[in-house]
Image: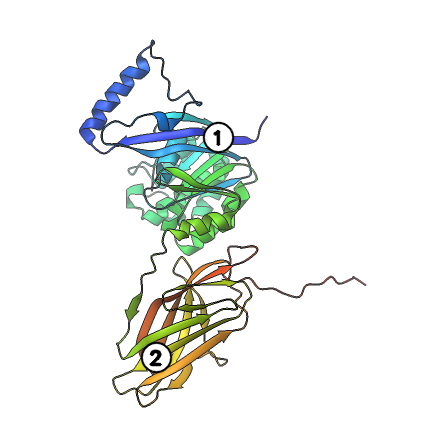
Amino acid sequence: MSDTLIKAEHVSKRFCRSLRKSLWYGVQDVCHSLNPWSKSDWHGDLGRDVGQTALRRDEFWALQDVNFEVKRGECLGLIGHNGAGKSTLLKILNGLIRPDHGRITMRGRVGAMIELGAGFNPILTGRENIYNQAALLGFSRNEVRSRFDEIVEFSEISHALDMPLQNYSSGMRIRLGFSVFAHLEPDVLLIDEVLAVGDVGFRMKSLNKMSELLNRCAVIFVTHTMPQVFRVCSQLMLLKRGCVQYSGRDIAEGVSQYFAAFDTGEQAITGSGEAQVLSLQAVTPGNRYAINECAEIRFGERLTISAKLKLSGGYTSGKVQLLFWNSELLPVMDVMTDNLTGFQFRTDERGIAEVSATIPKLILNAGKYNVSVIVLSEDLKVLCRHDSALIVNVTAACASGASVIMPAEWGCFKQA
């Protein structure tokens, strides 16, 4: 028997922007599907190009010609910007809505967390909801009873187990829901961003549990947090306006394409305004780049960033440092001096100073980084923070989910 538990073939789904027209189109589609003499079967005719199907007035494709398969032991990361079609696809997989074209094949028990608290009864207690969820998954009462203590211990809500669910916080509901699905071990697990509601500690527990589940089930994981994608996903699919923009096992490439759409290049200047970045230049082994340009550099190459600064408000000296941000707007590298402070400088009679910082080997992971220039006074008052003053694009032969790739001297040691 094949280990493929999820298979999507040419799946497409369309919606209508007008409620009135949507209801009328729905009636037409129902009548069409019940007509025994109808020759057109969009749902079953997989050889037909969905692009040839004309959209009716006010309709649009929420999903168009999506194909993938997930085997037991694999985790498909489903990413894309808001409105890309991720949640629509999960609802089709879970049987909540049907596709207008294509076919979905699912094998085994399916556990789905596609909305916060979905499937829970707010009037019942947490204890009663555990048994209800298990019954929906097809588990007997005896099976649930044997794993009940593990579910409660993992969820960490034993103090509220006999309290009505409507009194639970959103984080407590997620804890309970994920614990039920994870410990009853369905064959297919669908998760749609709900882990983002939990606290950091529970998210770590959940990701570790997902890694364990991969030995026994197939997982589709929707998230906007890319470190989680690198941690648990074995393959990746990027959706853009309902179409597959990337699909494959090169996680770094898919994530890179995901972040490319966020690259607006907009600068932001904050602080007291008593300092100003007049000009900036980045020098790589192959080129020179000015302020707000994208500096191309290979992993491990030398990078020099020079800036012309102007102070006002009576300041004649200050400190400057550079801060590198990744595509998720997380700080990944602070460029300082040997004593881990900002570089101290003094201005000339015009209030101008020219400073430079050289990084002998840039060992950041492949990807784009925004560079901020931060100018401080001697008492650490922020005189100027110039964000996105420069964009640095690092290319490398390989990439990982880490911010830094550190080459090391490796060797083998013989045992005595």
Q: Toward which corner of the image does residue 270 lie, by quadrant?
A: bottom left
Q: Earlier in the sequence, mark 2 or mark 1?
A: 1
How far apart are labels 2 and 1 at the CA level? 58 Å
Secondary structure type for disc 2: strand
Q: Mark 2: which amino acid?
A: Leu
Does residue 241 sit above or below 169 in this rendering? above
Q: Nearer the viewer, mark 2 or mark 1?
A: 2
Query: Would residue 310 be visible to someone looking at this image?
Result: yes
Q: Quadrant of residue 349?
A: bottom left
- Count numbered badges in the picture: 2
Say whether residue 226 is left or right of residue 348: right
- Quadrant in the picture for the N terminus: top right
Amino acid tagged 1: Lys
Q: What residue is disc 1 on?
A: 7
Q: Percent x, y for residue 23?
A: 21, 25
Q: Residue at x 42, y 76 (%)?
A: 306
Which residue in the rendered view is the most extreme toward the front?
Answer: 287
Residue 279 sits in which quadrant?
bottom left
Can residue 164 be seen at all in this image of the molecule?
no
Residue at left 36%, top 13%? 39
Q: Which mark is residue 110?
A: none
Colouring: rainbow
Q: From the viewer's side, name the closer residue of 14 and 160.
A: 14
The residue that appears at 63% across and 65% down in the rendered structure is 408
Secondary structure beneath disc 1? strand
Q: Nearer the viewer, residue 251 or 149?
A: 251
Q: Which residue is mark 2?
A: 309
In this view, 185 is above or below 333: above
Kindly give the residue lying farthest to the top in the view shown: 37
